[in-house]
Image (cartoon, rainbow, N blue to C red):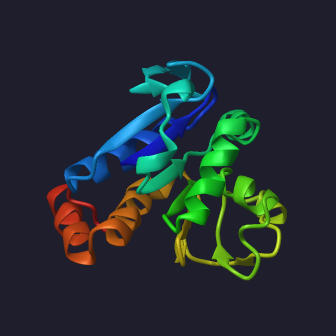
């Protein structure tokens, strides 16, 4: 199961575009409402999550996804459950995926030391110990980071490559007419 954590102030396409791409790959995905089951995106749209944070199960995690947005990223970082989910994912060696401002959460935890990573411009200093990449989406080991909303499809495709394979990612890319 891939869990996508949503907190009030999240960037809607950074969360839901990867959910769409992962679902097309046949990957089971659940959205987890951190601040409540009904979460409000930074643009004001309210999204009803599959579960609230109290229902999250640490034991069947294939990957976790942290969308950016403000103050969504701060709300994710302030969640004890999200912090434990990141630690658990790292301990069991499953992908931790963060886009836009959310890679800063991983940087603050020291998880990017010696790794290539990227984030939304202006958050680079928070990627403590990382080698800042010039790529828009970066996979280094089990950490996938992406620059921002403009590459949310590519971010989702990179997660599919990691969890399934490149052929499946390319098939989906062609299905949705992604030009990159």
Q: How many marks?
A: 0
Left or right of 1, for residue 53: right
Q: Is residue 38 above or below residue 26?
A: above
Left or right of 144, for residue 177: left
Residue nearest the observer in this picture, 21 or 28:
28
Which quadrant of the view contains residue 91? bottom right
Identify the image quadrant of the C terminus.
bottom left
Q: From this viewpoint, is residue 146 visible?
A: no
Q: Is residue 58 above or below residue 44?
A: below
Q: From this viewpoint, is residue 47 visible?
A: yes
Q: Is residue 80 above or below residue 54?
A: below
Residue nearest the observer in this picture, 1 or 14:
1
Q: What residue sits 27% from the left and 68% below the top?
A: 164
Find residue 112 and report its horizontal and vertical position in percent. 72, 71
Q: What residue sits 51% from the left and 50% below the top?
A: 65
Q: What residue sits 67% from the left and 58% below the top?
A: 103
Q: What residue sits 20% from the left and 59% below the top?
A: 177
Find residue 163 and report its horizontal and vertical position in percent. 34, 66
Find residue 136 and report its horizontal and vertical position in percent. 54, 69
Residue furthest to the front in view is: 59
Residue nearest the observer in this picture, 59 or 37:
59
Find residue 104 and report its horizontal and vertical position in percent. 74, 56
């Amino acid at each position: 199961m891939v869990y996508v954590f949503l907190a009030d102030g999240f960037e809607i396409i950074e969360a839901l575009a990867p959910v769409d791409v992962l679902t097309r790959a046949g990957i089971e995905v659940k959205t987890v409402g951190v601040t409540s089951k009904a979460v409000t995106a930074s643009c004001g749209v309210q999204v009803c999550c599959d579960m609230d944070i109290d229902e999250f199960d640490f034991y069947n995690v294939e990957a976790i996804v942290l969308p950016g947005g403000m103050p969504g990223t701060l709300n994710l970082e302030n969640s004890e459950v999200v912090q434990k989910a990141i630690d658990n994912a790292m301990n069991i060696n499953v992908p931790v995926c963060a886009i836009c401002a959310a890679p800063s959460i991983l940087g603050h935890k020291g998880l990017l030391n010696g790794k290539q990573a990227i984030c939304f411009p202006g958050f680079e200093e928070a990627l403590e110990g990382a080698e800042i990449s010039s790529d828009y989406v970066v996979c280094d080991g089990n950490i996938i980071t992406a620059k921002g909303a403009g590459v949310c499809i590519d971010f989702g495709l990179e997660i599919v490559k990691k969890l399934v394979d490149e052929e499946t990612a390319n098939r989906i890319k062609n299905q949705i007419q992604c030009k990159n």
